[in-house]
Image (cartoon, helix red, strand yellow):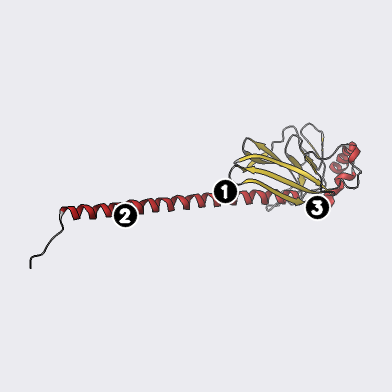
Amino acid sequence: MASRGFTLLEMLIALGVFSVIGIMSSQLVSRMMDTTERVTERGRELTELQRAFEVMRRDVEQLSYRYVRDELGDAGLPLEIGGNELIEMTRNGWVNPTGAPRTELQRVAYELRGSGLYRIFWPVLDRAPTTQPLEQLLLGGLANAEFRAVDLSGAEYLYWPLSPEYDKHPERQLVAIRLTVNSEVFGEIQRLWEVPVEARLLLEMSTETVEGKVEEEVED
C-alpha cells in the first residue's frame, strides 16, 4: 500500500495552528514578565514606604525635652509643627558607634520639596552660622504630607505649640503625632505615634520662658 504524505493545504493549516499557539504563548509569557516586574516594583516601593515610616516613628517616639538655638541664636522649641519645616524636633538615641565626642541627642526636621519628603538633621544641637545640615531623601512620589499634633482630648492641630492662652488647659497635653501622606502609588496613608511622657511637659511651659530655659540647658 503506497504511503500518503501531507498535502500543501494540510501543511499550511498546521503551520497556521502552530503560529497561533506561538503568538499566544509569547503574549502569555510577556504578560507574566510584566506582572512580575510590576509586583517587584510595588514590593520595592512598599519596602521604601515602610522604611521611611520606621525612621519617622523612631524620631517621634524618642522626642526629647531639649531646647536649642538656631543659626541666628534664636531659641528653638523641643518640638515645632507647621513652622519653617513640616516638623522639627530634638530626639534621643543618636547612635554613636565610634564613640565620637558628641551628644546622643539629635535635631531633626522634615521638609516636603516637590514630591519628595526629606529628613534633615544637624551635627550639633545649638547651631553656629556656619553649621550645615545634612539631608536625606526619605520618600518620593508624594502629592502631599503633613504632621499634626494630637492632644489629650483627641483634637488635632496643624501648628504646635499652641498660642500661650492654651498652654495651661488640662486637655491640651500633647500625647501623639499623626502623619498623613498622599502617595501617588498607594493613596492616602496615616500613621499615629505616641510621644514620650516627658515630651508632654512641653505644654507646661509657656513660649515666653523659652529663652531662660535655653540658657539653662546650654550651660548644663
Return the mark for residue 45: 1
Q: Counting other residues with Cα less than 10 Å from the Cα at mark 3, is it few (<14), some (14-19), or many (20 or more)?
A: some
Looking at the picture, how far across and down is residue 189, in whole percent? 66, 47
Earlier-in-chain disc, 2 versus 1: 2
Image check: 121 left or right of 31?
right
Earlier-in-chain disc, 3 versus 1: 1
Question: In the structure shown, which secondary structural element does the residue marked by tag 3 occupy?
Answer: loop
Q: Residue at x 69, y 36 (%)?
A: 132
Looking at the picture, how far across and down is residue 139, in whole percent? 62, 44
Among the 4 quarters of the image, the one containing residue 81: top right
Identify the image quadrant of the N terminus.
bottom left
Regarding residue 94, the answer to whether it shows in the image is: no
The residue pinned by badge 2 equals 21
Q: Residue at x 91, y 47 (%)?
A: 170
Question: In the structure shown, which secondary structural element does the residue marked by tag 2 occupy?
Answer: helix
Q: Are circles 3 and 1 on residues that touch, CB within 8 Å?
A: no
Q: Counting other residues with Cα less than 10 Å from the Cα at mark 1, is it few (<14), some (14-19), or many (20 or more)?
A: some
- In the image, 202 versus 96, the foreground residue is 202
Return the mark for residue 28: none
Disc 3 versus disc 1: distance between alpha carbons?
30 Å
